[in-house]
Image (cartoon, grey):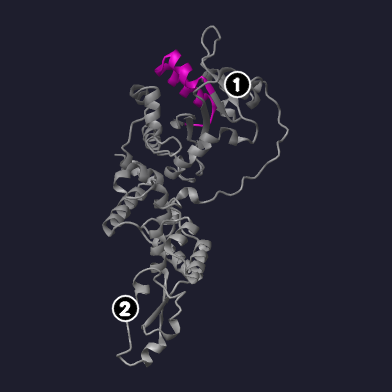
Amino acid sequence: MNVKGGTHLDLNDRIKIQAELEKGSMLKVIAAIINADERTIAKEIKKRRIKFNNHRFFSLSSNNRTNNCKKISRFPYVCNACKKRKRCNEGYFFEYKAKEAQINYETILKETREGIDMTLSDKCRVDVILKEGLDKGQSIAHIYHSNKDLIPCSESTLYRLINNGNTIAQRIDTRRQVKLKPRCKRKDKNKRDLGLFNNRTYGDFLVHILKHSPFYLVEYDTVVDDSNGAHKTLLTIHFVSLHFMIIRLLDKKEASEIAKQFVYLRRRLSDDLYARMFGLGLTDRGSEFFCVDAIGGVIDDHKRLAHLFFCDSYSSYQKGALEENHTLLRYILPKGTSFNDLDQNKCDLIASHINSYYRKSINNTPYNLFVAHFSNKIADILGIQKIEANDVYLKPALLNKIK
């Protein structure tokens, strides 16, 4: 039984072993001092002992030479405490030295942890899986989750192999490892307080959450086509707890266009379902979202189905979940891409691929979570379809696949 409980011997233990060997102590005495099993001590001495030539051996006649010293073949296995060493007829000496033994241990430990712990065929299979996924714009986390049974290592090990250059994937392919530039803090500017923001500020939003504790928070934003002479805009609707995003195409970045989209959604959904899904909304102070009645779903008796709140000025981080999700959208529609060729079907396809993309934070896909909370039918109404994990494509070429 290993009394040390499986821990490795350290330098102090080896110094004690050397000291006891030079005293001529018995194996069980050394084991008791080190608090380790006798077999552990014996293996340590035999494995780390150092071999020296006995120069006296070569000056002796062949009749006087010996090669069968019992002290070498059995404990103590070394000549540290041998009193006959000066007149020894053996060809070699063996010594145990603590510092050299520690260096040998550390070297072997380092070497065993280097390299790739997989066969050549396994490595080739991993490279093929990585290449196919990266060509589709998938992240390493998504590739690993979708092919767990085929990748013979953990996710952290896969990242380490990539960072060390041991796979076909390179560090630059791990998008999230690229550090973002520090956010510039801008001072709040004095801005005319519109009556529209009364009881709809971010502070009011926090109070509302404390009172009502809603499960579904929806964040709204717009993505503008920044190419020259373009007007089309994307309205993004993001369910924070589900990581689920809807994309609606607008002809212009105007409140009237956004109002049309929410009127459309309310008609496709029942009032109860609309209130459940869009009951609490948060957006920035862009004028396109000033259509609060359309978003709130005001009915005949002036009752609101949904509450809309606005972030503070220059504080888009207050709806950071949606801003983070926009990075996935930009994989498919990089800045400078024209939206003129987009239609609602293409927007639905983009949203379907993004929502079928595995998220490590929820250990699932947004589509699966949304369907679990609502249904496939509701997802179909919103234009979102499930994309198989290995078919998820997050590159501009996705739009070229549409017939």
Q: Which element type, helix, strand or loop, lies under badge 2?
A: loop
Residue 282 at least partly seen:
yes
Q: Vertical placement of 167 versus 68: above or below?
A: above
Residue in the image at 49% along x and 67% along y: 20
CA gap, disc 2 and disc 1: 85 Å
Q: Residues within 10 Å of mark 1 (few under 14, many from 20)?
A: few
Q: Residues within 10 Å of mark 2 (few under 14, many from 20)?
A: few
Q: Are marks 2 and 1 in contact (CB under 8 Å)?
A: no
Instruction: Give the residue type at disc 1.
Output: Leu
- For residue 203, which quarter of the picture? top right
Residue in the image at 28% along x and 59% along y: 120
Residue 171 or residue 317, whichever sits in front? 171
Instruction: Give the residue type at disc 2.
Output: Asn
Residue 146 or residue 224, whichever sits in front? 146
Examine the structure image and report whether residue 278 is included in the region drawn in magenta.
yes
Relative horizontal placement of residue 151, taking residue 52 as reference (left or right): left
Q: Position of residue 13 (x, y in %)?
A: 50, 61
Q: Position of residue 89 (x, y in %)?
A: 37, 85
Residue linked to disc 1 = 210
Label 2 or label 1, whichever lies nearer to me, is 2
Q: Which element type, helix, strand or loop, lies under badge 1?
A: helix
Residue linked to disc 2 = 68
Which mark is first along the chain, 1 or 2? 2
- For residue 117, which quarter of the picture? bottom left
Q: Main SS of the magenta segment?
A: helix
Examine the structure image and report whether residue 66 is included in the region drawn in magenta.
no
For the magenta stretch, what is the residue range?
251-280
Quadrant position of the C terminus in the picture: top left
Relative horizontal placement of residue 74, taking residue 315 as reference (left or right): left
Relative horizontal placement of residue 1, taking residue 296 as reference (left or right): left
